[in-house]
Image (spheres, rainbow, N blue to C red):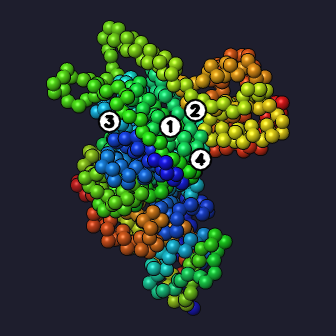
Amino acid sequence: MKTVYKKPESMTSATTIYCPGCHHGIAHRLIAEVIDELGIADHTIGIAPVGCAALAYDYFNIDFSETPHGRAPAVATGLKLTQPDHVVFTYQGDGDLASIGAAEILHLANRGFNITTIFINNAIYGMTGGQMAPTTLEGQKTTTTPFGRDLKVHGHPMKVSEILSNAAGVAYIARGAVYDPKHVMETKKMVKKAFQNQIDGKGFSMVEILSTCPTNWGLSPLDAVEWLKKNMEPYYPLGVKKDIDQEQ
Amino acid sequence: MGEKYLMKGNEALGEAAIIAGCDAYFGYPITPQNELTAYMSKRMLEEGRVFVQSESEVAAINMVFGAAGAGKRTMTSSSSPGVSLKQEGISYLAGAQLPAVIVNVMRGGPGLGNISPAQGDYYQATRGGGNGDYRLIVFAPNSVQEMADDVMDAFDLADKYRMPAMVMADGMLGQMMEPVEFKEPKNKKDLPAKDWALTGAKGRPRNIVRSLMLGGTGLYEHNEVLRKIYAQVEAAETRYEELETADAEVTLVAYGSASRACIGAVRHLRAAGKKVGLIRPRVIWPYPYKALEKQAEKSKKFLVVEMNLGQMIDDVRIGVAGKAPVEFYGYAGGWIPTVKEVVDRVNQML
Amino acid sequence: MPKGKVVINKEKCKGCELCIAACPKKVLGLSEDFNTKGYRYSTPLHPEECIGCGFCAMMCPDVAIEVYREE
């Protein structure tokens, strides 16, 4: 029999600390599969966020750095500019990237350095117990929006991919999801392009992945998928937001 | 008032701040103080006051700077790495003489560390942390009741002296649940009026909130103003508790969660006929140097117990001024002393 | 002889059921017993239906699944 699927080489055998059904695990797998397929594991460096994926380095067989909350784009800049032949990617959640790290990601996107960012948007702060994130939806109840997100009090949910697409240094920004095999396959193509762009020296590339957080949403993994489809997808439409290859 | 509630430290502190009249709370999630931010996100809105979950700890301290500049009672909270982010803003608050309350629910460090209790930010709180010569009034509660009492006093003293004040709790105090009774807030009429606040210059000369003083001797004079204020605070706001110190051969010195085991150790050792006492600072700036100076006349040895690698011990050595040996017992990284550990360590000294 | 074969590491499985929902042939279901972490784990209840499409492995966040197919 031929092997249709087995663990990517770039993933360790460690059991992750992620909750059952958390989409972090799927996103990690896609990155590892892409790193394997592109044959870049021995010169790829990953950058972990502060958030549930703070221990991401336990799950990848490649060099990895921690960073202070939100500063991954800056740390990536330091790593990439001093070793331009290496592949450097940041892996960040919605708090890390869009809240405290907003300045850093905006400047990286504008600078257009050859760095890849994988942005996990689950509309909540997971690690710290379910607080509002910049991407939390209007009306969504979290531990810091106990009455539901009120636009007047808490502001609007942030459409990060759309906002960053306007930055001049961006080569590619796309938004995907991983809630069924079809979307997993489409998002994997996005992730592969985002890494290939770095290898080809095209500029800053980012893939935003709409993800579930069953525990903090208070839903089962499958119900969380339905909630995402019903609530997140209409506000955060999937698809390519910017691609300089299409513009030429 | 008069009613006892069973509350988590983080939440009791939040409720006490509201009772003290906190007009605006700005915070960002970080363990182990998330319950405080979550509590304020609900209660502040219920009371019609200002709550913002800021984009970062840096943003929060600057929102505090704004609210403080408006003459409002304002507070932010975080834990060690987040308080590091606030240092610039705290220095600005001190330089601009703005009252504000900052709560640090300490966790293990350095860096991202862990989420367990620690006392590793003592230097940061009492030796500046931010740039320049400034001081904070730093409260050191060791119970849920004291967390509630201290935050109310922090607002009052911050207003009285026009300076920021800090409440230093730790992950254990923030998480534990104990009975708490909320005291009556002080009458704000006893405090100086905030005629310096940015309320709009209608009918009065304009006010400027600033810490920048470029030309001539401006900054020199400003620092002399600060020096005088800090001297007044040192003279009037030292707070500490003494337990069985009158005839103590070994005197323990500890604050916060570390002091709880020390209290137990003193009781245990005294029951065994050993002469041991405890000096527990309730405020770690200004520091009770005089109490230590006096105790050094009576006590043969001091043992400083901290949940770090040795920070407050510097202040104990200053107070004792070489009159007696000062030893250290402590570990960083989430260690909390047990009564037995402290008893064993003291027995080595007796 | 089924076209495909699914091997699930029951100790890695957290019982999230994403694979069960993704399987087009309804091969998988939750076990009756528990793994050492206390999860009911995904397991082939109808292995004879497996076509080796790999959808289950594509969904698994815990890399608990290996899929094989007849040449």
**Looking at the image, is B98 positioned above or below residue A207?**
above
Q: Which residue corresponds to mark 1?
A: B150
Closer mark to the observer between disc 2 and disc 4: 2
Q: Are marks 2 and 4 on the same chain?
A: yes
Callout 4: residue from which chain?
Answer: B
Q: Earlier in the sequence, mark 2 or mark 4?
A: 4
Q: Quick one: label 1 or label 2, which is nearer the N terminus?
A: 1
Residue ID for mark 4: B172
Sequence-wise first label, 4 or 3: 3
Q: Secondary structure at mark 3?
A: loop
The residue indicated by pointer 3 is B72
Residue type marked 1 = Asp
For residue A218, what is the image quadrant? bottom left
Cα–Cα gap, marks 4 and 3: 30 Å
Give residue A16's position: percent from left, percent from top: 57, 61
Q: Same chain for marks 3 and 1? A: yes
